[in-house]
Image (spheres, rainbow, N blue to C red):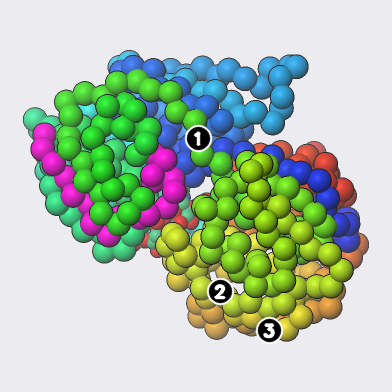
Amino acid sequence: MDRIRIVGGHALNGSIPISGAKNATLPLMIASLLTEDDLTLENVPDLADVALLKRILANHGVDYSVAGKRRGESVHAGETLTLRAKAIVDTTAPYDLVSRMRASFWVIGPLLARMHEARVSLPGGCAIGTRPVDFFLTGLEALGAEIDIDAGYVVARAPGGLRGGALRLPQPSVGATHTLMMAATLTRGDTLIENAAREPEVRDLAECLVKMGAMIEGAGTSTIQISGRDRLNGAVHEVLPDRIEAGTYAMAVAATGGDVLLQGARADLLTAALDALAGTGVEVTSTEGGVRIRRNGSGVDPVSVSTAPFPGFPTDLQAQFMALMTGARGTSEIRETIFENRFMHVQELARLGADIRLDGQVATIRGVSRLRGAPVMATDLRASVSLVIGGLAAEGETLVNRVYHLDRGFERLEGKLSACGAEIERLRA
Ligand code: EPU
């Protein structure tokens, strides 16, 4: 298995191009199942999760082609991915694929809406928590689906097609909102989703669905209204920039010091995280070209945060912010409210010398004057990148093992960081 080797202690200076958002790309790709026409997505990041979802969609009969990234073109431009679900050849999403990426469960919505049946493996456990699918199932039932669980599979049927319905999510789940919104676009009648997730990726998906002919209002707020259609058409859509990637590099610069322009990053998608960073004493400026992060001289002040659904502080930046707080001038508290087990980075950060006490959902971090490099183990995507941040700030050498977690969600991580002066390289297995 590949490893990443970091020699810490270098400030980051320069600019980092921000890729298209992983968590927008995945539902947008799944939306291709809703139409027999071409769906072309621009600014698609080159990530392991995107590659895996291409395979999963191909299994359902989706053809795809990729343009861009040819020799001579800018390596910073994302791919242009065209997906075409002319005919759905299989409505089963098998365990061996779904268990490798939870978001692939979301195919259940479009498959059921278009084919009136779907058999999708339950996604199973996940490193960051139990992550059940009850909201999806109750929501699909509200749209007229009949649901059975058989041998680890959700078997969903809607003889004659889905119909509109009214439903309220018990909690604003991102995946359930994506799935139910997609399903509701191809129904008879009107659908109302209350307590919907307000994440920017939900709005991005809705914008694409509207280009495909869907009738959706309110995406990006907690109440979404959808009027069903009998068919959708193709569209061309550009994926929005990855706010979590941008926030991650912002925290890396805050941890090492330096001055970096996050090219293409949108401050309006990152308000809570940038406010927290500004509270630590880091200079955050929103410019036309992106977001500029600057920290010179002295260290960072402690800031306590609590994760929350958008527009709150994102759970997907909790580990990275904790890595930053390990070096703060004082004590901070980080509360995780979205996932019950998203603290696996704590013991690995401790291997770098961090002083963190965990009590239920609250981590208390006492800043130390310096971290020291060590071998560490990546456990999930965001936890792994927090170890990279720790390694960049630490003295000496850090070796991050199990790098495949990073490849799921960070495009050209070593390249982007080393272009700004970091000493970081991939050691191929
Ligand atoms: N939940 C239920 N039942 C359900 C659905 C969700 O109890 O049927 C609970 C979850 O267990 C969790 C909460 O609701 O406690 C919120 O989970 P949500 O459904 O919003 O998460 P998700 O859709 O599975 C997406 C992102 C995650 C991100 C979360 C929260 C993608 C592909 N995944 O997951 O991203 O952490 O929203 O913002 O968009 C990552 O990129 O590293 C990542 C884990």
Residue at 68 percent of width and 17 percent of height: 70
Q: Secondary structure at mark 2?
A: strand
Quadrant in which the N terminus is drawn: top right
Residue where numbered disc 3 is placed = 331
Between discs 2 and 3, the one toward the N terminus: 2
Residue at 51 percent of width and 17 percent of height: 65
| Residue 9 visible somewhere in the drawing | yes
**15 vs 406, nearest the viewer:** 15
Q: CA distance from mark 1 to mark 3?
A: 38 Å
Instruction: Give, as a three-letter code, the residue at label 1.
Output: Val
Residue occupying the far right of the picture: 396
Residue 207 image offset from top left, x and y in percent:
37, 36
Mark number displayed over residue 239: 1
Quadrant in which the C terminus is drawn: top right
- Whether 23 is among the magenta residues is no
Between discs 2 and 1, the one toward the N terminus: 1
* Residue 424 relative to residue 245: left or right: right
Q: CA distance from mark 2 to mark 1?
A: 29 Å
Instruction: Give, as a three-letter code, the residue at label 2.
Output: Val
Q: Quadrant of ligand 1?
A: bottom left
Residue where numbered disc 2 is placed = 305
Residue 212 versus residue 137 in the image, above or below? above
Instruction: Give, as a three-letter code, the residue at label 3.
Output: Thr
**49 vs 240, nearest the viewer:** 240
Counting other residues with Cα less than 10 Å from the Cα at mark 3, is it few (<14), some (14-19), or many (20 or more)? Answer: some
Pointer 1 with pointer 3, Cβ within 8 A: no
| Residue 132 visible somewhere in the drawing | no
Mark number displayed over residue 6: none
Image quadrant assignment for residue 252: bottom right
- What are the residue bounds of the magenta stretch? 188-205
